[in-house]
């Protein structure tokens, strides 16, 4: 029996998330989770200022004898670019690392240069081996899973974490934040950091060995990096009132130029989010993004609903982007059409780290009950 279509009366999440539930007033489970759980990790207030001041002291003390006290991964997008500007204000000495997975838009390259120049930062660019990236991305297309962005995302974070550990930098600064990303359906896909899943999909559909492509194993992610090397990921934007539009306005004032869409800095991600996901799976990633802005008080539900009325793609842009996408991956438009029409699979159809991750989460919960505090490695 087909589930009746329903949209939350508070945000704009709908039944494209098969796990969503609604209360008697039509408010969805994402909104309730945000209020009960997520808000506890978000400090857009005086407490956030105090907590961030303490964290800043900790970061600076750990890096006092080093050339850099932290690493910032800079994609050229709004969040990481704004974070880089704020880091300058805080007196931090970051090494800026940009990971080039082969899909940067020209505007993204320009925006990275603008931020680095404005702040006077050193920039280190890590270029992912294109033939391996191409083979991995084709593996994901052939697999039929929803999250086609995993090859880029995993390479980005794996490169940052490995570079931090190798260069004895304890803190990796992330632009990830609750104000704009506080709502996201777990049912849409698994973790991009799951190297077990990534390698399983590539073993099934890949054609060449991944020799240079960077990965982070489960043990490295949860044990070696944080406890042996002392690496921590910090999300400073969660300790302030982070307003997306104000961030854009600030960036524009120094010459940074907006993309028009979230994650427009990657030509792959643009097509993946605005075409592949909605056409193939019915997932419109604008919904969780706009819902996050609603529950964090940045826009109204009416404004979000109006945004959803806009077309995801202009026909001319879609044709151009599809042509570029297929040419770069070395496939025909007919090949792409076959992948779009092929069997749909879940990431969980392949080997993954879910069982081990559940065990880690249970251990963290036990520690919290016994000791009365969280163990947060990637905060």
Image: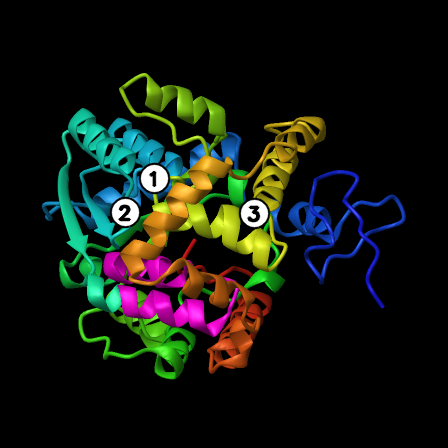
- For label 1, the SS is helix
**Nearer to us in this view, 351 or 323:** 323
Q: Position of residue 125 (x, y in %)?
A: 16, 49
Assess disc 1: are there few (<14), some (14-19) or many (≥20) residues with their C-alpha within 10 Å of its C-alpha.
many
- From what the image shows, is residue 238 above or below residue 360? above
Q: Residue at x 35, y 45 (%)?
A: 266
Discs 1, 2 touching: Cβ within 8 Å: yes
Question: Position of 142 compared to 365: left or right?
Answer: left
Q: Is residue 346 left or right of residue 324?
A: right
Marks 1 and 3, the one that precedes in the sequence: 1
Query: What residue would you read off at disc 3?
Result: 285
301 to 165, vertically: above or below:
above
Residue on which disc 1 sits:
80
Which label's residue is closer to the chain start, 3 or 2? 2
Real-space CA distance between mark 3 and mark 2, rounded to the nearest whole angstrom:
23 Å
Q: Determine whether 302 is above or below 131 in the image.
A: above
Q: Quadrant of the N terminus?
A: bottom right
User: What residue is drawn where x is 39% and y is 73%?
Assistant: 198
- For disc 2, the marked residue is 73
């Amino acid at each position: 029996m087909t589930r009746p279509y329903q949209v939350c009366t508070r945000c704009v999440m709908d039944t494209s998330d098969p796990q969503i539930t609604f209360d008697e007033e039509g408010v969805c489970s994402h909104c309730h989770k945000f209020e009960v759980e997520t808000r506890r990790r978000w400090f857009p207030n005086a407490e956030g200022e105090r907590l961030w001041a303490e964290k800043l002291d900790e970061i600076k003390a750990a890096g006092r004898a080093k050339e850099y006290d932290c690493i910032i991964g800079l994609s050229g997008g709004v969040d990481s670019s704004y974070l880089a500007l704020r880091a300058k204000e805080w007196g931090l000495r970051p090494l800026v690392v940009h990971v080039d997975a082969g899909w940067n838009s020209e505007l993204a390259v320009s925006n990275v240069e603008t931020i680095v120049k404005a702040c006077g930062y050193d920039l280190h660019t890590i270029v992912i081996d294109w033939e391996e990236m191409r083979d991995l991305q084709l593996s994901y297309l052939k697999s039929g899973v929803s999250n086609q962005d995993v090859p880029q995302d995993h390479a980005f974070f794996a490169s940052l974490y490995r570079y931090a550990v190798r260069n004895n930098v304890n803190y990796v600064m992330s632009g990830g934040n609750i104000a704009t990303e506080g709502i996201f359906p777990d049912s849409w896909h698994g973790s991009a950091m799951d190297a077990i899943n990534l390698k399983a999909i590539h073993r099934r559909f890949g054609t060449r060995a991944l020799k240079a492509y960077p990965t982070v194993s489960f043990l490295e992610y949860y044990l070696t990096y944080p406890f042996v090397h002392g690496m921590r990921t910090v999300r400073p934007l969660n300790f302030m009132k982070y307003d997306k539009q104000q961030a854009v306005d600030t960036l524009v004032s120094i010459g940074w130029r907006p993309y028009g869409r979230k994650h427009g800095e990657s030509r792959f991600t643009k097509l993946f989010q605005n075409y592949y996901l909605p056409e193939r799976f019915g997932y419109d990633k604008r919904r969780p993004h706009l819902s996050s802005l609603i529950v964090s008080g940045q826009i109204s539900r009416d404004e979000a609903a109006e945004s959803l009325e806009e077309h995801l793609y202009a026909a001319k842009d879609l044709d151009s982007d599809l042509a570029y996408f297929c040419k770069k991956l070395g496939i025909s438009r007919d090949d792409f059409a076959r992948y779009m029409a092929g069997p749909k699979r879940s990431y969980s159809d392949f080997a993954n780290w879910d069982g081990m991750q559940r065990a880690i989460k249970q251990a963290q919960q036990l520690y919290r009950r016994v000791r009365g505090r969280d163990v947060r490695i990637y905060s």
